[in-house]
Image (spheres, grey):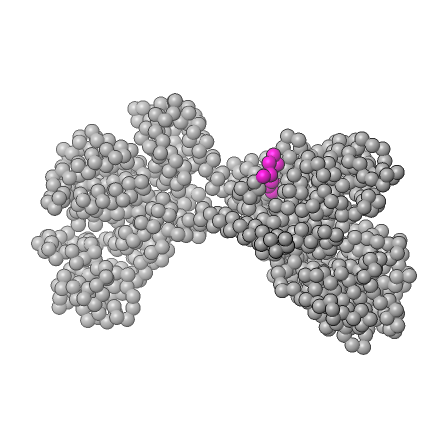
Amino acid sequence: MLEIFEVTLKNTIYMLQEELKSIFKKHKSDNEIYHDLAQYHVREILLVTSLYDAFILEEEEKLNEKIFGEYYGLDLSNVPRITNASDENEAETLLSQKYFDFVIITMRTQNLTPFELAQRLKNIKPDLPIFLLLYDNSDIILVNQMRDKIDIFEKVFVWNRDTKIFLAIIKYFEDKLNCDNDTEVGLVRVILLVENSIRYYSRYLPILYTEIIKQTQRLITKDNLDGVKKILRMRARPKVLLAVNYEEAIELFEKFKNTILCVISDVKFPYEGRINEDAGIKLLQKIKAVDSDIPFLLQSSESTFAETAVLNDATFINKNSETLSDDLRDFILDNLGFGDFIFRDRKGDEIARATSIDEFKHQLKKVPAESVLYHGSRNHFSAWLMARGEIQIAEHLETLKVTDFPGADEIRDHIIGVTKNVETTVSRGGVVDFSPKFLEEDNLILRLAPGSFGGKGRGIAFINTLLQTRELFSGIENVSIKIPKTAIIGAEEYENFINKHDLYGIHMDHDYDEVKQIFLSKSLSDELVSKLRVYLDRITSPLAVRSSGMFEDSISESFSGIYQTFLIPNNHESLNERLKNLTDAIRLVYASIYSKHARSYFEAINYRIDDERMAVVLQEIVGIGYENIFFPHISGVAQSYNFYPIARFKPEDGICIAAVGLGKYVIDAEKAFRFCPKYPKIDIVDPETQLRDSQSFFYAIDMKRGISNLAQGEDITLKRVEISDAESLGVLDDVVSVYDPQDNKVKVGLNFKGPRIVNFAGILKYDLFPFAKVLGRLLEIIESSMGLPVEIEFAVNLDENNPGFYILQLKPLIRSSEFFTIDEDDIVKENLILYTERGMGNGKVENISDIIYAVPELFNKAKTEQMASEVEKLNVMMKLAKRNYILIAPGRWGTRDRWLGIPVQWPQISNAKIIVETDLDDFKVDASLGSHFFHNITSMNIGYLTVHQSNGRDFIDWEYLRSITPENTTEHFVHLHLPHPVKILMDGKKSISLIEK
């Protein structure tokens, strides 16, 4: 049976991992599709020309300089290099030495004609693309006389002293090679140019490319895209394909008809091998018969075709017009969607104008029905949206007809609805630049400033992406699983703040209290403050202002609880006052990098404090307001790996520690309820222990007390509320039970007299809310995604109309490493100082000769604060001696409750390498699982051992310790320096740890 179970478990994990891979592959594809576009770029060009023409091109025309200028002016990357060769021998030598994308041969070459030279180069490299570049229009006559030889060239162009022709040749060649991929992968649009005249397509292509690139660049600028996104969006510009006869045109149209943006065609060109006087008309009618909405520009030197064009719903321009270039530009702007969207009435007169997507949606709501029908029947909406990169919206609209709707209002509503849905779908689960329009969206993270998100921000962004795939939570109904509304201030704001106010090294000359006041006196950037004002104008619920350092919550180091987090009511009637509170909290988070606590931690892990950078996470606090307090019904932490499983539980089953109210209660390692998400109906401890260790109070945000000075600390905005006081609020019905001392039983609900126990029985035992099911599924998904055990911090609202489970943050639980193994058969307990089956840590330590322990007989729960000071003094001595040590004492290390153990902070014991929590006959306390203190010691691979001497197996050899002469003593502690290092072995898999004498 065990083997069957293990196989089933492995199959389940494999299927989950494959499902997660598929999700992230899709997510990456949706967000990085531009990376797959325009894969081919021209980098090296060989230009073969006479010495004279080479001189003219380089000295007079400054060809390379102008090519670079064209690319720079159009904000293009990948500027190709042009290498000159003056004759066939030099060309052959260069071709043998390096790779060229293609060759350009001019009409005037030495020794050989261009045709002979092309053939000679083809003999060397048969697949080498070669272009023929004519000097001016007079050369066209010569070429036309030798049409039977032209096929050796990729294409023939005429220069006419316009260096833009080189840009056109390069882009034409790139488009030809990229078009198949780009239209399939990215739905990139295609402009089909049908023109057999060398003179005119040499004129049209530079205009087309210049205008397309300029207009694309203009839209990029409007969208405020950054450098990388600019390049990527440019890759998605429309491609231009050239056909020189009817058959080529039809072939290209049939191949790309689903992505054709427009057709620009001559009237007279080859049809069935011969020049046809109205081939362009045939093409126009053929294409319009397939898709009447495709914009079609017919151009001819004969104005008589203008009427024919109009009759076939096409635009006409005269080739002989002195404004030909301007006419072509106007067509691009008016028909291809690059200009403003001009709403017109049925007569074609302008009635409104939109320059952006937001303006478009705004105007669309107001324009009359006749305008909606006018544009809808001509596919203007989809064309304009397509030019702005709104491919999904445009694609959808293109499949619809006006006749698919009862009327104009339904068309209007549909377009607005589709736009909103696609925007939500595309950005769902992602991080978007701050905009007021996104403040109502639940599944987005807003970026208030650029730069890294920091460790906490990265974890939140990662889990938010996972949560968008509801298929992962199939079987869990009627509950919302998400993160709170979140905004992130990227780390660049911190860097700019430090640089602007010259604050580097401030901790060298000022203590922490002074640092906080200095930071509070300095201003954040005007841009951030302006955004925060808009943010607060819409967000009026309490806010958590969380640190998110670069190193925080990383796999290698925890930094848990090292920096500050502030919970602010955000309910003052003055917006300016709320803004001050928020900006104060942000600056104090920045300042917390320089706290004594943080500096000691940096020193312990051998990091430089100046290397740290700080992002800040803003989250709406999960909860409901009751009278003058605000708190969630449930909060806590859940871990996918339980270091201290009991009974039938396995480490992989995980553990959850939950409490009523804000999560600070659990993080501070107060008495909270523990259960296994896999077996939520099984109580871990007996009823008497539940009563003894039950939660008696909780933390809430004080909504009545104003904020006088946040620098006083994180707790300034919080209120401690007794569980008994909360019963009258009606929030404990499903989370509290009653202890019956007569039967030694716990009765679910509050309909009984007796002591209250917070055990969430109504939820865990009767499934009133799928608490355990959500936890179990989340832990499974996240651990599988990260490849190592994890912890989540969560909050729950039990609102009967909209219950919600919120993930507040995510962190790795332990570093992924190979487990050290202890062979239990080899253990000789007489040779041990300590043995425990509840050890946490992994590996072998053989360089510690010092032990500091609290004398059991002298331990006094009423003097634990004094004991913290004593151990701090011993720790200072050990730091000066540069020696690590083993630290042993009863109760919890690092607790905030002095009655549960010694309330040290990390700097007070920073040189301890092994920390031991033990019990006494009259003092038994659970380990510090889930606290910040716990995370920091485990992340540094400090051994964390719990010795339950009462279980009959764990032990400490106190007689051996007493037999050694102390090196130092205090009122409650003894410091031993052994003559030789002890051997410490920690089996992370079995949780067995021991210290040999």
SS assignment for the magenta stretch, majority: loop
- Rendered view: 716 above or below 929: above
Residue at screen point 25% across, 60% down: 102
Residue at screen point 73% across, 49% down: 667
For the residue pair 275 and 598, the one nearer the viewer reads as 275
Q: Is residue 5 magenta?
A: no
Left or right, 815 with respect to 830, comes to left
The image quarter containing residue 121 is bottom left
For the residue pair 386 and 738, the one nearer the viewer reads as 738
Question: Looking at the image, can residue 466 be seen?
Answer: yes
Left or right, 680 with respect to 860, comes to left
Outermost residue, front direction? 1
The image quarter containing residue 840 is bottom right
Question: Where is the C terminus found, in terms of image quarters?
Answer: bottom right
- Rendered view: 886 above or below 683: below
Question: Looking at the image, can residue 704 be seen?
Answer: no
Q: Which residues are magenta?
A: 475-484
Residue 754 in picture, x, y percent from top left: 85, 35
- Rendered view: 115 above or below 235: below
Outermost residue, bottom direction? 979
The image quarter containing residue 762 is top right
Residue 708 in picture, x, y percent from top left: 74, 42
